[in-house]
Image (spheres, rainbow, N blue to C red):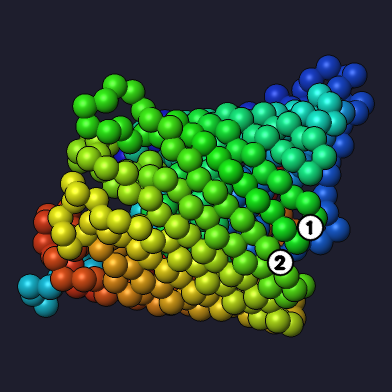
Amino acid sequence: MATRHCSTAGHCYLFWIIAFTMPSPLLAQEEVIRDEAPDDVRIYRTPEERREAGLKYKVTDWLTVSGLVELEYIFQRFSLSDSSRHTHDDDFSKSLQLGAEITPTSWLTGELIYEYDDEGSGSHTLDEATASFEAGDFELVAGKQYVPFGVYLSHFVSGPILEFGETRDKGVTLAYGPDDRLDFSAFAYRGRAEKQGSNGGEWGWGLATEVSPVEWGTFGASYISDLADSREGLLRDFNDRYERRVPAWSAYGVVGLDRFEITAELVRALRSFKELDPEANRPRAWNVELAFYPAGSFEWALRLEGSNELEDAPKLQAGASVAWRIFKNVSITLEYLRGTYEKGLAEDSKERELDKVHQFGSQLSIEC
């Protein structure tokens, strides 16, 4: 394992030392904002909820800070297509997320999200940097942000396969919410992908809507003009250059009945990438999960997901997870997944074709 040049815990301690050794006028206004009880057993179920996670410490009337520390271990055992041998891979990672929310006025909010991941020699990222302007039922968000394409709901350690559609770039999002049951969004962003022969990134755009017609159900759909702009980097081997844009759409639903919750989501390209091989040029994936909340601070979940024409992703995968809210700000999740690959679409680091995978995962999340 590579030598770590800095520790996640060290970053968290440094953050709080800075926050709580400010001059006394600021400390006098210091306040920790806590909910009465956690809404869910897991601290978050979507990437957006993860970015909002953390205990909220009100340092001043206009500044609130938060933090999230995570330890994650994934072990994978692969079956090879051309022999009875097996190979394996494992990864232990530590990450730290720090958030700051600045509210100088009632209609203006600034948000910064910093993330450190110890993978390799360590990665420091300004994950989001936005300014939000509110006026009545409208909100305009400008800056480095995740555009509202897909939700990526999950109760597992590992995100669903369909996260290949997640997109983050500099841009603007205009949201309209006339009431608590209906939301519309339109967004434009400076994408990573470029048309062959052009100079500089091009602007992409999209639409999203969410509706809650009944108390027990929420449904949504979204559209993006170019899937090549996603963080997955589908055209990375082609320097993110495309012959034509490939739009995509996403849809999801959440149904909650008593102690059960069912989530279903789909991400699908609407045309083929001319640059990619025919067997993997029109990616799509889906995910269905059933969660059960028994009495107490436990959660059980089942997952069934699949993909088509998505390189290195299982064609079909199923598994189970269990989560435990140990303390109000601490949760642990364990998972097991078994997947099978489409012939010719997945290889290991030695270019050996993969047939099946057994995956074990664990995650400790701490809001600080």
**Farthest residue toward the left?**
82
The reply to whether residue 12 is in sight is: no
364 is higher (above) or lower (below) than 287: above
Which quadrant holds residue 138? top right
Quadrant in the picture for the N terminus: top left
Which quadrant holds residue 368? top right
How far across and down, in percent of the image, does residue 131 sit?
67, 29
Is the C-beta separation of discs 2 and 1 under 8 Å?
Answer: yes
Q: What kind of residue is marked 2?
A: Ser
Q: Residues within 10 Å of mark 2 (few under 14, many from 20)?
A: some
223 and 85: which is toward the camera: 223
* Left or right of 78 on screen, residue 106: right
The residue to which callout 2 is attached is 212
Q: Secondary structure at mark 2?
A: strand
* Left or right of 64 on screen, residue 352: left
Q: What kind of residue is marked 1?
A: Asp
| Marker disc for residue 180 | 1
How many marks do you count on the picture?
2
Q: Residue visible at 33% across and 49% down?
A: 246
104 is higher (above) or lower (below) than 256: above
Q: Residue visible at 81% across and 24% down?
A: 104
How far across and down, in percent of the image, does residue 220 sit?
59, 62
Q: Residue visible at 75% across and 73% down?
A: 214
| Marker disc for residue 233 | none
Q: CA distance from mark 2 to mark 1?
A: 8 Å
The reply to whether residue 276 is in sight is: yes
